[in-house]
Amino acid sequence: MPTNFPTPTTIAMSPGTEIVFGVLLVVAVALIRRRAGSGNAQPLPHPPTAADRLVGRAAALGALLALVGWISGSVSEMYLVVPPAVTWWHYAAPIAGAAVGAAVLLAIATRTPTRVEAPVAPTTRRTWATFANRQELGAVTATVAALIVVSVLAGFASSRVDGAWYSRLDIDGGGSTSFYGWTYGLPVLVAAAVLVGLGWTALSVDARRPFRHPSAVALETAKRRASAAALVRLSFGALLLSLGGALSFIGGSGMGSTGFGIPGVGMFVWSAGYSSFAPTIFWLGWGMQVVAVAVLVRITVDGLRRRHASTTPAAGLQEDAVVA
């Protein structure tokens, strides 16, 4: 008897595959870096403070909550929720988890005491973006913009189910299919707004804190850049995971079809108007999920290992350090 092997699309649609491939991506990158001799992070020139260690743990907490929220939503959607009920919180859960981590990072920045031993002469105004990497901020901004566009457009395209949930897509000609509508998109937009607000506030508070001493500017600048990187990467990973999930949902809905058969006449089948490029949307979203999982797993591992990435001042940092 012929054996029906699962197709790549079928495998990708299985819950948890993005987690598996994301972990594999982290392992592959770590092995490549180890072979290249760049896998070991350089230690700080001075022992890390309790606040330094808390930053990594707070980011790890947010990343872990984002992953747990995503997995919980997938499991609930597959095995626990019976239609027409929906897991409206599924795609917002990763962002909400990251928001918890951002809130902890904000608390650390707010409560970290700064004992000024010698004032540092100001040279320029420091803002929320001073210590963050411009490319990473750009990636977060683009992800937020894409998430807004996708959620709004999909929301307007969705239809209500039994007068309650906006979680269906009506197909021209007859029938409907499950869809990423307002039921999923609105919680995502609210969670994203909370995360962005907390992140902006945390970056602003940390940037405005005075330096302890002119001789400590280089070290403190490096630490604040590391804190900003932890927050920005956490936000990027969570937002990208939600965006990828939404695109995969939309693409998967467009790849299906609906119809009925009439004995002696034949089958009448309808599909979504974007079915021709739905596979591209699905695989783009799935790839985003894999990358997002890899980012969040790396943050979790680094935080639990008490590593504080990018904290060693580079040569010449004294010359371009921003002081206040």
Image (cartoon, rainbow, N blue to C red):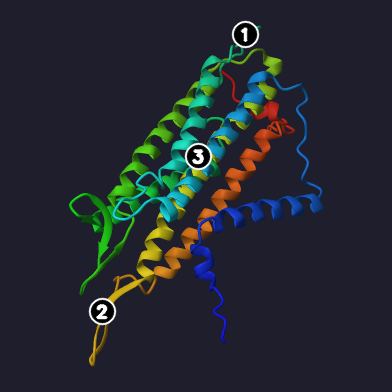
- Residue 115's tag is 1
Task: Report if residue 122 is visible in the image.
Answer: yes
Q: Amino acid at mark 3?
A: Ser
Q: Residue at x 41, y 58 (%)?
A: 247
SS category of the residue bearing label 3: helix
Mark 1: secondary structure: loop
Q: Residue at x 54, y 70 (%)?
A: 8
Q: CA distance from mark 3 to mark 1?
A: 30 Å
Disc on the earlier residue, 3 or 1: 1
Mark linked to residue 260: 2
Reading the chain from its start, which is encountered first: label 3 or label 2? 3
Q: Is residue 34 above or below residue 306?
A: below
Q: Which residue ends up furthest to the front in the rendered image?
A: 1
Q: Nearer the viewer, mark 3 or mark 2?
A: 2
Determine the image quadrant of residue 135.
top right
In this figure, which residue is indicated by the disc labeled 3?
235
Q: Residues within 10 Å of mark 1 (few under 14, many from 20)?
A: few
Rendering coords of residue 45 (x, y %): 78, 25
Q: Residue at x 62, y 8 (%)?
A: 115
Q: Is residue 196 above or below residue 253?
A: above
Amino acid type at image mark 2: Phe
